[in-house]
Amino acid sequence: LPAPHARAGAERPTVIAHRGASAYAPENTLAGVDKAAELGISWVENDVQRTKDGELVVLHDDNLKRTTDVEQVFPSRAPWKVKDFTAAEIARLDAGSWFGPAYAGARVPTLAQFMDRVDLHHQKLLLEIKNPDLYPGIEQQTLKALDNDGWLDVPHLGRLIVQSFSADSVRTVHELKPAVKTGFLGTPPVADLSWYATFADQINPSYTSISTGYVDSVQAFEGPHGRPLEVFTWTVSDADTARLVAGYGVDGIITNSPDVVRDALPEE
Ligand code: G3P
Ligand code: CA
């Protein structure tokens, strides 16, 4: 009998550079996109939030402390929330020195800058809408930004997935632009998957929360575009874990070290 995941049509999982190739370059910067491209990785993940004056920017945390020099530049502005700073203020910050001196001067990119860099390398974008409760209307605004840059044109739709930990946010994206592929970040109970499958093409769980059985259960559902739900799992750092989750049958592996994960997976 074939092994559970030696089934017909099973493919090597897609490798996604988490926040860019963030083991090697500061997360969510253009340098991280460049590094992923240099490693030959076509999918890049990022996190999108909004400034005080309504600009979409790429940053993971809801505040600027961990990954910029905001405390030095604006010492009186605690707790340094993204939503309390203008785009011009954020553009002054160094988002690279914390990672290493070679990256001094790296900036927090706007979403437009980030998309342009991904496009320059002919890469693909796994865009996470981060903390949507803090940013009413961010789904519509993000879709408009994507549309303005041509990402919603039919030839490019296959280069884009929009995901969020917020089911409401994912559902809103699906309802506003049904053609866009979407992902829900989390591990919903199997009993709830039929509901998620009405608006999400992917269920994207932590690798620590899944098994072959769970992945099979997800993939048994058909998503809103009539294809089996996919599973992109996160955040895998080492070769052994990459092989483990590939054995679960996941469709994608989100990783800070995309070269390590790619090289750990068997050739197709
Ligand atoms: O893309 C999956 C992963 O990014 C989810 O967690 O906290 O790194 O945004 P986080
Ligand atoms: Ca993320």
Image (cartoon, grey):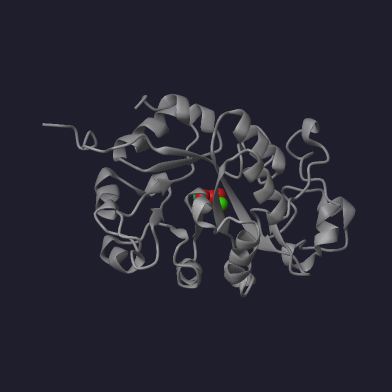
Asked if residue 195 lies left or right of residue 90, the reply is left
How far from the left and from the top, in percent, is residue 149? 65, 57
- Can residue 23 be seen in the rendering of this structure? no
How far from the left and from the top, in percent, is residue 238? 47, 30
Asked if residue 107 lies left or right of residue 21, the reply is right
Q: Quadrant of the N terminus?
A: top left
Q: Which residue is found at the position 88% from the left and 62% from the top?
A: 76
- Of 69 and 152, the residue lying toward us: 152
Q: Quadrant of residue 88?
A: bottom right
Q: Which residue is found at the position 76% from the left and 33% from the top?
A: 100
The residue positioned farthest toward the left in the image shown: 1
- Of 162 and 209, the residue lying toward us: 162
Asked if residue 75 lies left or right of residue 47, the reply is right
Q: Quadrant of residue 257?
A: top right
In the picture shown, does residue 228 fall above or below 118? below
In the picture shown, does residue 137 fall above or below 163? below
Looking at the rendered structure, the number of numbered marks drawn on it comes to 0
Q: Quadrant of residue 265?
A: top left
The residue positioned farthest toward the bottom in the image shown: 136
How far from the left and from the top, in percent, is residue 187? 38, 57
How far from the left and from the top, in percent, is residue 10? 28, 37
- Of 175 and 252, the residue lying toward us: 175
Asked if residue 9 lies left or right of residue 34, the reply is left
Q: Quadrant of the C terminus?
A: top left
- Can residue 80 be seen in the rendering of this structure? yes
In the picture shown, does residue 154 fall above or below 122? below
Q: Which residue is found at the position 33% from the left and 36% from the top?
A: 11
Q: Which residue is found at the position 74% from the left and 69% from the top?
A: 54
